[in-house]
Amino acid sequence: MKRTIAAVLLVLSLGALVAAIADDHVDTIRLPSNGLADEVATAATEKKRPWKCCDSPLCSRSIPPRCRCMDAVEQCDEACTRCEASQSDPSKRMCNDRYHGWPGPNCTEPDADDIPSGPGVSGPPVVGQEATAAMATETSVSEESAAVGEEKPRPWKCCDHPLCTRSSPPTCFCHDKVKKCAKTCKKCLKDESGSSLRVCGDRYFGWAGPRCHEI
């Protein structure tokens, strides 16, 4: 009986010794990908936008987008690496850097003519057949632009009443009635409610942009 107990204790002791030796020789394996996601996220966060603000961004359809700022300025921001002469005004500069992310805030407040006014502020304007046809045309143009990857400026500086598709990014139409359409609007239509206000009949492939009035 004593011999049996001694044998059992010996076996248990040997097992514990073998396990301890195995633990001493096992190294912790660190995969190459450990911490890589954190490093990439940190690097992306640390990359500074090449401009402090932008009134005329041109962005791709990706999420987040790749953007350029078409503003002609007196001097580029210090974060800009490609500050070149503006083609429209050689006396001014334009940053030709591309930024992977949202373009940031506007530099100036929207013009009064770009802000909805009159009785249509509380709701969308009445848009008739002319606007509907324009919307259909702009949809096909947007699809063609998307196929070739063109970047297109937004037809309005701000919009309180956008109508957008559920796609991502969406195709948007702005229902705002304004005194004067933005310069980038190609189809500035008369409001059919009888007022002297205008409605931009363009459709834009992308996010509708900032609101003209705070909620």
Image (cartoon, helix red, strand yellow):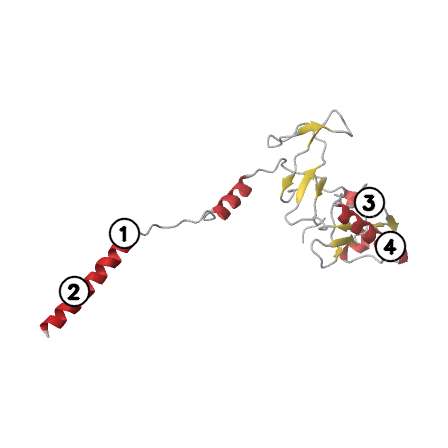
Q: How many marks?
A: 4
Q: Name the residue at 63% across, 48% down.
A: 64
Q: Name the residue at 85% across, 45% down.
A: 186
Element at label 3:
loop
Residue 104 in percent (x, y) is at 64, 42
11 lies above or below 71: below
Of residues 105 and 100, the one nearer the viewer is 100
- What is the residue that sits farthest to the top in this orientation? 91
User: Which quadrant is the C terminus positioned in?
Assistant: bottom right
Check contact, mark 3 vs mark 1: CB within 8 A. Answer: no
Taking 101 as reference, is 38 left or right?
A: left
Q: Amino acid at mark 3?
A: Cys
Q: What residue sits right under mark 2 in the picture?
A: 10
Residue 84 in percent (x, y) is at 69, 28
Choose top left, top right, bottom left or bottom right for residue 129: bottom right
Q: What residue sits right under mark 1 in the picture?
A: 24
Taking 156 as reference, is 63 left or right?
A: left
Element at label 1:
helix
Q: Name the residue at 90% across, 55% down.
A: 130
In the drawing, what numbered circle is on residue 198?
Answer: none
Element at label 4:
helix
161 lies above or below 98: below
Query: What distance separates the C-alpha of mark 2 from that of mark 1?
Result: 21 Å
Q: What residue sits right under mark 4 in the picture?
A: 131
Q: Earlier in the sequence, mark 2 or mark 3?
A: 2
Of residues 3 and 140, the one nearer the viewer is 3
Does any portion of residue 61 appear in the rendered image? yes
- What is the residue that sits farthest to the left in this orientation? 2
In the drawing, what numbered circle is on residue 185?
Answer: 3
Q: Earlier in the sequence, mark 3 or mark 1?
A: 1
Check contact, mark 2 vs mark 4: CB within 8 A. Answer: no
Residue 106 in percent (x, y) is at 68, 41
